[in-house]
Amino acid sequence: MTFLAIDVGNTRLKWTLYERPAAGARVLAHGAEFLEQLDRLAEGPWAEFAEPTRMLGCIVAGQAVKHRVHEQMERWEVEPRWVVASDAEAGLTNGYDFPARLGADRWVAMIGARHHMLARGPARPILLVMVGTAVTVEAIDASGRFLGGLILPGHGIMLRALESGTAGLHVPTGEVVEFPTNTSDGLTSGGTYAIAGACERMFRHLFLRSGAEPLCLMTGGAGWKMMPSMMRPYELVENLIFDGLLVIAQEREALHGGV
Ligand SMILES: Nc1ncnc2c1ncn2[C@@H]1O[C@H](COP(=O)(O)OP(=O)(O)O)[C@@H](O)[C@H]1O
Ligand SMILES: CC(C)(COP(=O)(O)O)[C@@H](O)C(=O)NCCC(=O)O
Ligand SMILES: [K+]
């Protein structure tokens, strides 16, 4: 029983085909496409394997993109299924004012993060930083309750906002340095330290609230760029969204024989 997991963000569609819908399942194939190029999936990489038995995904990219993804799956019988954040699922409870309005990618990544932690040791609070098009900084307590999270612009959006709102900030990408002495380095360092500073702030909020030292995890396509500039040790876990989708699929399969 193969399982296709899909994560559609605001920049790229990422997909992984697993041998079965269960945590730790073997990867059979995987890939990523920028949203502009997703229309070549069906005749490209997805033509190279047999129809998956199950599919589950998360999408935050909007209806038009979702429709295009469905078009790529049309030649298959398998029903496209998309996670919606709820009050509780797979060991996580949702503290959002309106739980379904929480980004599905954030919800799924938090489920992946909690299972990642519990597979390695006792329950602790988790600070989860996800660096994609936007950056989110999530706080989860030791019982698995999502307390709340920050939303910040990612590197690309910060740079484009500064470029379009000023006359003098059209420069190439710079380096992250402590004391920038040119415009490029000033912009690159400013964006990076804005994100690192917000993470540190949330770390303190969570530590104070929970009384225990949070485990710091980082994920998302641009996570590797942030790692060297963080103010404390973080573990970079590339596949938290896919780990979360596997956990959800496994639970749903056990509960009602489908995702
Ligand atoms: N090889 C890469 N291709 C594209 N974007 C990359 C790559 N490596 C890092 N990035 C960065 O990662 C971000 C996209 O990350 P991703 O997790 O795919 O975002 P989203 O989930 O919002 O689509 C881009 O803003 C880009 O700066
Ligand atoms: C915060 C996000 C834009 C992040 O998107 P991404 O960077 O992964 O493309 C997305 O999770 C979203 O649209 N969330 C809905 C609003 C919310 O979570 O409150
Ligand atoms: K994402």
Image (tube, rainbow, N blue to C red):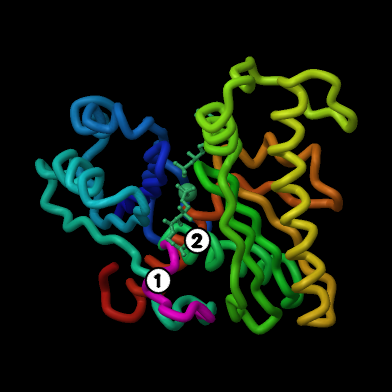
Judge whether residue 148 is colored magenta.
Answer: no
Q: Residue lying at the far top in this picture: please name it.
A: 172
> Whole-Å distance between the Cαs marked 1 and 2?
9 Å
Q: Quadrant of residue 13?
A: top left
Q: Is mark 2 within 8 Å of ligand 2?
A: yes
> Relative to 119, is 90 above or below?
below
Q: What residue is at 77 percent from the left and 81 percent from the top? A: 209
Q: What residue is at 80 percent from the left and 37 percent from the top? A: 228
The amino acid type, in three-letter code, at marker 2 is: Arg
Q: In terms of depth relative to the viewer, which is nearer, 158 or 15?
A: 158
Q: Quadrant of residue 21?
A: bottom left
Residue under circle 2? 106
Q: Is residue 7 left or right of residue 70?
A: right
| Numbered circle sitting on residue 85 | 1
Q: Residue lying at the far front in this picture: please name it.
A: 167
Q: Is residue 56 left or right of residue 135?
A: left
Magenta stretch, main secondary structure class: loop
The span picked out in magenta is: 94-103
The amino acid type, in three-letter code, at marker 1 is: Ala
Q: What residue is at 84 percent from the left and 82 percent from the top? A: 211
Q: Residue lying at the far right in this picture: please name it.
A: 179
Q: Quadrant of the C terminus?
A: bottom left
Q: Are marks 1 and 2 in contact (CB under 8 Å)?
A: yes
